[in-house]
Image (cartoon, grey):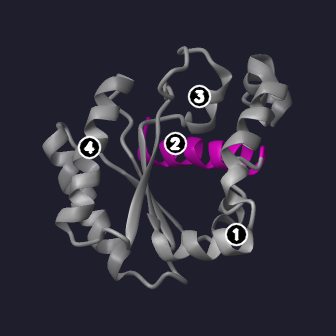
Amino acid sequence: MDDEAIVAATRQWIEKAVIGLNLCPFAKAVYVKNQVRYVVSRAPHLDGLLEDLDRELDFLAAADPEAVDTTLLIHPALLADFLDFNDFMQLAEAAVGEHGLEGVIQIASFHPAFQFEGTGPDDISNYTNRAPFPTLHLLREASIERAVAAFPEAGTIYERNIETLEKLGHAGWAALWTASGR
C-alpha cells in the first residue's frame, strides 16, 4: 500500500470506530478541525522508527496546537507481532523522557492484534485499541486535560467502550468494514 492508502485506511478507522462508535469522545473535535497529523514511517528497522518518533515528538512539541494537536505515527510493515510492538512501546515511552516531554506528550498505542493483559486474543474488548496498522498516537497532555475537564466522566470511558463493543460483537465489528457498513 502507498502512504495515501495507509492514511485513508487509518482515517476510515477513526471515522467508523473511534468516532463512529464514540470510543474516544475527544477525537471528533480535533478530527473535524483537521488538527490530526498522519505520518507513515517507512523505516526499515526499529532504529529508523525511533528516529521517526524522535522527529515527530520534536515536531509536535514545537507545533501550534491550533494547527496540529495530535500525531498518528503509523508503520505498516514493522512490528506486525503485537508482543514485539508492546515491547517497543517501552522504547517509545523512554523517547518521550529523553526529549524532556514527560507531562507534555504521552503516547497511546494501537495495533491490529492489540490485546489487553488478561484477555484472550479474540476478546472483543481488545478491539477498542485495534487499528489497521501499528500506530503510535502522540497526544498533548494539555489537550487531554482540557478534554477530561469537559467530560467529567472520563474515568468511565474504558468500561463504556467495552460495553459498546460487547453489544456490537464480532459480527457488528466486521460489518463496520463491509460495503454495506460504509
Kind of element beneath mark 3: helix
Q: Position of residue 172 (x, y in %)?
A: 81, 24
Going by the image, does 155 lie left or right of 132? right
Q: Which of the numbered marks, if any, corresponds to residue 126?
A: 3
For the residues marked 1 and 3, what is the alpha-carbon distance in whole angstroms? 24 Å
Q: Which of the numbered marks, if any, corresponds to residue 29?
A: 1
Disc 1 residue type?
Ala
Identified at 39% across, 36% down, the residue is 76
Disc 2 residue type?
Ala
Q: Earlier in the sequence, mark 4 or mark 2?
A: 2
Q: Residues within 10 Å of mark 3 (few under 14, many from 20)?
A: many
Q: Which of the numbered marks, if any, corresponds to residue 90?
A: 4
Q: Nearer the viewer, mark 4 or mark 1?
A: 4
Q: Which of the numbered marks, if any, corresponds to residue 6?
A: none
Q: Earlier in the sequence, mark 4 or mark 1?
A: 1
- Residue identifier under label 2: 5
Q: Position of residue 119 (x, y in %)?
A: 55, 19
Identified at 51% across, 29% down, the residue is 116
Kind of element beneath mark 4: helix
